[in-house]
Amino acid sequence: MKTYAALGMRDAGIKLIGPGDITQDNKLQAMGKDAIGLVTMHHYNADLDNAENKRVVAAWKKEYGADSTPDFMAVQGYDGMAAIAHVAKTLNCKIDPDKAMAALKGWKFNSPRGPIMIDPKTRDIVMNEYLSELVEKDGKLYQKNMATTEAVKDMCKELGAGKCK
């Protein structure tokens, strides 16, 4: 980020675009002002405007402090535990591997990252992806959501590309 700024790329109007894991919510403030304007695409950031995300972020901050923020890994863990709870409830805690996989096919959940589903054919997650820009507000960096691509599937499998044939 410092090199990007030092080379004057942002000032020249050149946008830096990257994957969302380079802007983890719990590391944004450490990135500094050089990161302002960075554009990313990812399946989660703590500034998503949905009721479940607001509830989870508030509970997280209550537990870990106002300056702590959940990141995409925390939300993936949250969703994973919800899937495990779904299977346990569906199977009345009598876990059987084949029945567990069957219980997850088509499973839908209202996640902090938005609606998710397990594709019954591929068993991959289907989820929204969010285009965000790193901005500053009230002296803090946050991810401003610019656009949402809904219900994204694994494109490698969808297109039958490369190793996914």
Image (cartoon, grey):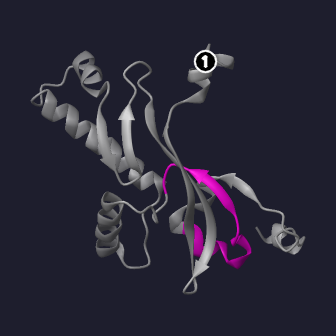
| Position in image of residue 37 (x %, y %) | 70, 69
Q: Is residue 77 above or below residue 136?
A: above
Q: Residue at x 44, y 35 (%)?
A: 126
Which quarter of the figure is the N terminus placed in?
bottom right
Residue 126 belongs to the span the image colors magenta: no
Q: Which residues are magenta?
A: 27-44
Residue 31 belongs to the span the image colors magenta: yes
Q: Residues within 10 Å of mark 1 (few under 14, many from 20)?
A: few
Q: In this image, 134 relative to 78: left or right?
A: right
Q: Please, what is the three-letter code of the amino acid marked with disc 1?
A: Cys
**Residue bearing mark 1:** 164
- Given the current orientation, which residue lies at the most extreme bottom position? 138
Q: Residue at x 27, y 43 (%)?
A: 82
Q: Is residue 94 above or below residue 126?
A: above
Question: Between residues 137 and 57, which one lies in front from this camera angle?
Answer: 137
| Position in image of residue 15 (x %, y %) | 78, 62
Q: Is residue 33 above or below residue 149?
A: below
Q: Quadrant of residue 63?
A: bottom left
Q: In this image, 147 relative to 11: left or right?
A: left
